């Protein structure tokens, strides 16, 4: 998944909440289709939670819902889902996309720099009060 840390976004037109996505997802197919569909859904949710935990700059809080969006996969005839959510403390918006979003490239490039700065700030705060000799 491609990770993007973006300035605040207030409206998520064209997306549905994760709860709507889960309630509207149907797995009616052949006998094995239901099981395969549930396995894919389980993989998607595990991927989401794993990626959220490793998202730079995310403080662990969410305002509103986690939203789901779909993009056509350029390498197959399927639609792949991505996720977007907003942090409560400062409105930062996070995007996990299965497909690279070129117009958000500048945000992707800044993730490493922001994460490094955050680590340095934490390290600095941990060292406050230490005697330098």
Image: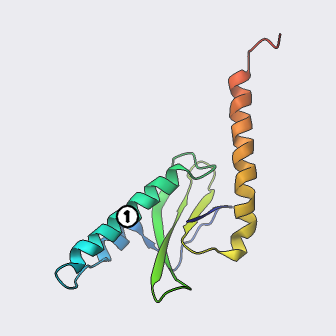
Could you tell me which quadrant the C terminus lies in? top right
Judge whether 118 appears above or below 86 on screen: above
Q: Tell me what residue is drawn at x 73 percent, y 21 percent.
A: 128
Q: Closer to the camera, 112 or 124?
A: 112
Judge whether 49 appears above or below 25 on screen: above
Q: Tell me what residue is drawn at x 47 percent, y 74 percent.
A: 81
Residue 7 drawn at (x, y percent)? 68, 61
Q: Closer to the camera, 73 or 5?
A: 73
Residue 15 drawn at (x, y percent)? 48, 76
Side (left or right) of 93 relative to 112:
left
Q: Tell me what residue is drawn at x 46 percent, y 83 percent.
A: 79
Q: Tell me what residue is drawn at x 70 percent, y 70 percent.
A: 104
How would you rate the neighbour count of disc 1 (Cα within 10 Å): few for under 14, some for 14-19, many for 20 or more? Answer: few
The residue identified by callout 1 is 43
Count of picture labels: 1
Could you tell me which quadrant the N terminus lies in? bottom right
Side (left or right) of 57 relative to 27:
right
Judge whether 113 appears above or below 73 on screen: above
Q: Secondary structure at mark 1?
A: helix
Judge whether 60 appears above or below 105 on screen: above
Residue 64 drawn at (x, y percent)? 47, 59
């Amino acid at each position: 998944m491609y990770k993007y840390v973006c300035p605040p976004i207030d409206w998520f037109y064209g997306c549905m909440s994760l709860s709507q996505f889960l309630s509207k997802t149907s797995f009616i197919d052949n006998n094995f289709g239901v099981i395969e569909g549930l396995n894919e859904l389980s993989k998607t949710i595990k991927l989401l939670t794993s990626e959220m935990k490793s998202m730079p700059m995310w403080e662990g809080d969410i305002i509103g819902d986690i939203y789901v969006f779909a993009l056509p996969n350029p390498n197959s005839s399927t639609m792949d889902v991505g996720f977007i959510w907003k942090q409560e403390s400062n409105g930062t918006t996070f995007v996990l996309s299965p497909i690279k979003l070129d117009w958000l490239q500048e945000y992707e490039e800044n993730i490493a720099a922001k994460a490094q700065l955050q680590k340095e700030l934490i390290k600095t705060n941990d060292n406050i009060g230490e005697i330098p000799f």
